[in-house]
Image (tube, rainbow, N blue to C red):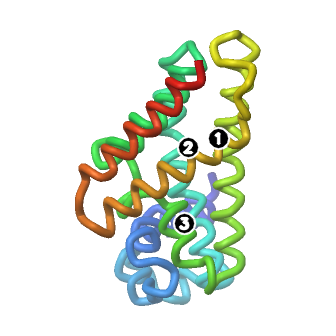
Amino acid sequence: MSKAERTKQFIVEKTAPIFNVKGYAGTSVNDMMAATGLTKGSIYGNFRNKDDVALAAFDHNRKKVDQVVRREMEKENSAKGKLMVYAKVYGNFYKDAFPEGGCPILNTAIEADDTHAVLREKAADAITGWKNNIAGIIQKGVANNEFSADVDPEQIAISIVALIEGGIMVAKVTGKLNYRTAIMKSVEKMINDLS
């Protein structure tokens, strides 16, 4: 890795938590400078603008979540076990190596839906990719006779994503972690009912 690549990575790693907690609009150049110890010129010598830093920070935060999920999925052999990973990981995301501030997809989607088209598109692509991964696991479960052939993988997959993200949002807004726990139990029931 070149010095420039290391510097870019350093900037992303240091600013990603700030963007995930404060959002795009709430993160200032001064925040980025304080987190990195770099000047504005050094930051923008490596990125064209704040948008580029924010997009790289979103990718970094999303990758951290994907790594946690992938690590847990590697321990599972069945389609059902792999799906249950989502309920387990998102039910305990304060205990896992999630990015500070929680789920970057949820945080970015909520802020950027009406304010930042490129970030909104990143969040939408992340949701679509997540839904496709879940649908693929369900399809494998159907092919292996683990799940009923009557299930609609796309419908179940997007419902799981919506329940998880909704559960996180409700718990964050109300400060009641038991709401997230209750909603993750609904995710588990949905998965159990696939058989």
Give the number of the mark in front: 3 or 2.
2
- Looking at the rendered image, the disc whose residue lies closer to the viewer, 3 or 1, is 1
- Image side of residue 47 versus residue 167, left or right: right
Location of residue 41 in the rendering, given as x and y in whole percent from the top left corner: 55, 88
114 on left or right of 172:
right
Q: Amino acid at mark 2?
A: Ile
Q: Percent from the top left, x then y, of residue 58?
A: 56, 64
> x and y percent of residue 101 in the render?
36, 63
Query: Label 3 to label 2, Cα distance in Å?
Result: 25 Å
Q: Which mark is residue 57?
A: 3
Q: CA distance from mark 3 to mark 1?
A: 26 Å
The reply to whether residue 52 is in sight is yes
Label 3 vs 1, first from the N-terminus: 3
Task: Answer above or below: position of 159 versus 113.
Answer: above
User: Is residue 45 something that shows in the picture?
Assistant: no
Assign a secondary structure to mark 3.
helix
| Image mark for residue 157 | 1
Would you name the residue on which mark 2 appears?
A: 160
Q: Does the residue at mark 2 contact the one at mark 1 (Cβ under 8 Å)?
A: yes
Instruction: Tell me the element at label 2.
Output: helix
SS class, disc 1: helix
Q: CA distance from mark 2 to mark 1?
A: 5 Å
Given the image, on which type of amino acid does mark 1 rest?
A: Ala
* Residue 153 spot, x, y in % from top left: 71, 34
Figure check: 141 above or below 26: above
